[in-house]
Image (cartoon, rainbow, N blue to C red):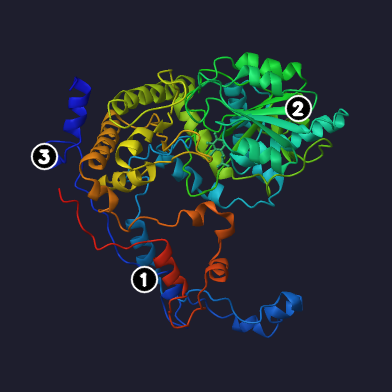
Amino acid sequence: MNHAQEKLARNALLRRDGGLLRDFHAMRWDEPLIMEMGRPGERGVIPPQATDVAADVAPAEDLLPAALVRRSPPALPEVSQPQVLRHFTRLSQMTLGIDVTIDIGEGTCTMKYSPKVNEQLVRSHKVLELHPEQPEGSLQGILEICHRMAGMLCEISGMDDFSFQPGGGSAAAFGFAAMARKYFHERGEDRRDEVITTIFSHPCDSACPATAGYKIITLMPADDGYPDLEALRAALSERTAAIMITNPEDTGIFNPAIREYTQAAHDAGALCYCDQANLNGLLGVSRAREAGFDACHFNLHKTFGSPHGCKGPGAGALGVTAALAPYLPAPHIVAVADGSAEHGIRYHLDSRRPHAIGKLRAFLGNLAVVVRAYAWTMSLGARGLREVAEVSIINNSYLEAQLREIRGVSYPYAEGRRRWDQIRYSFEALKEDTGFGTEDMKARFCDFGVQTWFTSHRPWIVPEPFTPEPCETYSKEDLDYWAAALKRSVDDAYDRPELLASAPHNQACGRIRTWERFVEPGEWAVTWRAYRRKHGGGGRGDEPDERSPQAGLRESRWVVQSGHDDPD
Ligand SMILES: Cc1ncc(COP(=O)(O)O)c(C=O)c1O
C-alpha cells in the first residue's frame, strides 16, 4: 500500500476505531402525510370575522364569475399550529440538509456554503416588502444594487450588459435562443434554424433552443475526450444560428481550443453562447467575451453564494455584447443622468424597447437572489473572486488524488488529463467486479451522514457515473471525510456485499425503488391531485385502502426499514 492508500484506509474507519467516519444514524419519525393529519374543523389560526362590514360587502363568491366558483371547498389539511410545527420539524430532521452535511456530490450544481449574514440582508423589510408594482421613484435602492451587480458581471465576463429577469439558468438559455431568433429575423436570416451543442454541455443548452423552435445538433467528443473542433466545423453551415455550449463541460474538461471553436462559429455567421451557470473554476481567471462569446449566463444561485437546490428561487444573469443588448427582455434597468437625483443618477425601468424579446418573468425576476449575490461579490472583492476559482481547483485536485486510489473508480474520456473544478468519475470497473453500480453505492454512502451524489445528466455517456464538485467552501477535513466514506462504501461492495444490497441502514427511510417514476414523464405527478388521478387513491375522509395515496407512496417509493444499524 502506498502512503495515500494507507491514509485512506485509516480514515475509512469509524472514529471509535481511530478513523474519521461518524457513527451516524438519521432520525426516523414514520411521519404521516399532512393530508392525513388533523380533523375536520381544526385550525391553526382563526382570524376575526369582519362582522361590522359583512353586511356592506357582497359575499366573495358573488364577485367572481359563476364558472370560476368552486362547487365544494378545496381538500386542504386542517391542522393546529403545534401539529404543523412538529410535522415540518420532524421532516427536516429526516433530511440531510445543507447545514449538516458535506454537499460536494452535486457536481455541476456548485453547492457551496451561502453566508448566513446575507440572509439577514434579504430578510430586511427593504427587500421583503418590496411591491412589484411600486413606482420607480421608490425603487431606487434596489435598482441601484441590480445596476451595480450588472456592472460587476460585465467586468467578470467582458460582456456589455446584463438582465436578471430569467428565473434560472435554463430561463436564461431560453432567453438567449429567443434573442438569437429575433436578431436573425431582423437581419433577414430566418434560414438559420439550427443550434449546435455538445453532449457534455448542460441539457438546457439543447432543450431551451429546441423549445424556442430550433433544430438541435449535438456533437460527441473527439477520441481524446475534448470537444471535437473538426466535428464542429463539419456541422456549421448557413443554417446555424448559434453554438450553445458549457465550458468547462460537465465532465470537468475545459476546451483548450475554445477560441478556434468560437472563431469557426463566427466564420459561419453564427452567434456563440457560453453556459457559465457554473463559473466556479473560472471566476477571475478567464472571460467569456475574450474566448469569443457573444453572450453567456451565470447562475447567481450557484456560483454567487445564493442557496439553491430543490428548485428554490434562482436568477440566471443573462449577459450580452452591445450588438445583442437591444434584444434583452423588458423592462431593462438603465442609469440616467439626472441633476435632481441623489449623486446625479436616477435608475429607470426602460420598457420602450422595440427589439426586446418581451418578458421572461413577472416583474424584475428574483431580486433577493441578486441582493445576496451582490453582498457575496462585494465581500470577496476582485482578489477574493479569483481565490474562489483557485481554491475550487485545488480542492478538486486534492479529492481526485484520493479517489484515484480507490479500487473500482476511474474516469473515462481524456483519462489522466487535467480537470477543472469537478470530475465525472465512473464506477464501471466496480460494477464489473461486484455487480454494484452508482445507484447502489449512493445507498451505502449516505449511511455515513453525507449527501449522496448527482450521477450525470441523461443519457449516461460515462458508464455508472458520479460527479463530485468540491467548491471553495469545503475544508481539507471535509474532503478527507468524503473520500473516506466513498472508500468505505466501495470496500463494503467488494467485501460485504450483503450490506450493500440492503443499504441504506442508517437513514430515515429505505431505498427509492421506482426510479422510472422520475424518468418517465408519463409517470410524473406534480401536484397531489395529479398524483391521485394517476396513481389512485380516495379523497380526504376516505378509509385508507390499498389504493390510497399513502399506500401508493409507501409501496412504490419507499421501503421503510426497521432501523438495523451498520453491524460495525
Ligand atoms: C451548467 C449548467 N447550465 C444550466 C443549468 C440550469 O440552471 P437552472 O437549474 O437554474 O435552470 C445548470 C443547473 O443545473 C447547470 O449546471
Residue drawn at the location 40% of the way across and 18% of the way down: 416
Q: Determine the residue located farthest toward the right in the rendered image.
A: 188
Q: Who is closer to the viewer here, 136 or 546?
A: 546
> What type is the residue that disc 3 sits on?
Asp
Instruction: Please give left or right for residue 286 compared with residue 407 in the image.
Output: right
Crowding near the residue tagged with mark 3, few <14, some 14–19, many ≥20 C-alpha atoms within 10 Å? few
Identify the secondary structure beneath mark 3. Answer: helix
Judging by the rendered image, the residue that carries numbered circle 3 is 17
Crowding near the residue tagged with mark 1, few <14, some 14–19, many ≥20 C-alpha atoms within 10 Å? few
Judging by the rendered image, the residue that carries numbered circle 2 is 240
- Residue 74: give x, y in percent of width and height: 58, 76
Instruction: Please give left or right for residue 46 compared with residue 23 in the image.
Output: right
In the image, residue 443 above or below residue 258: below
Residue 79 lies in quadrant: bottom left
Q: CA distance from mark 3 to mark 1?
A: 42 Å
Query: Looking at the image, can residue 503 be seen?
Result: no
- Residue 216: give x, y in percent of width and height: 69, 35
Between label 3 and label 1, give the one nearer the viewer.
Answer: 3
- Residue 211: give x, y in percent of width and height: 70, 43
Q: CA distance from mark 2 to mark 1?
A: 59 Å
Residue drawn at the location 38% of the way across and 31% of the way down: 470
In the image, residue 221 above or below residue 501: above
Q: CA distance from mark 2 to mark 3?
A: 61 Å
> What type is the residue that disc 2 sits on?
Thr
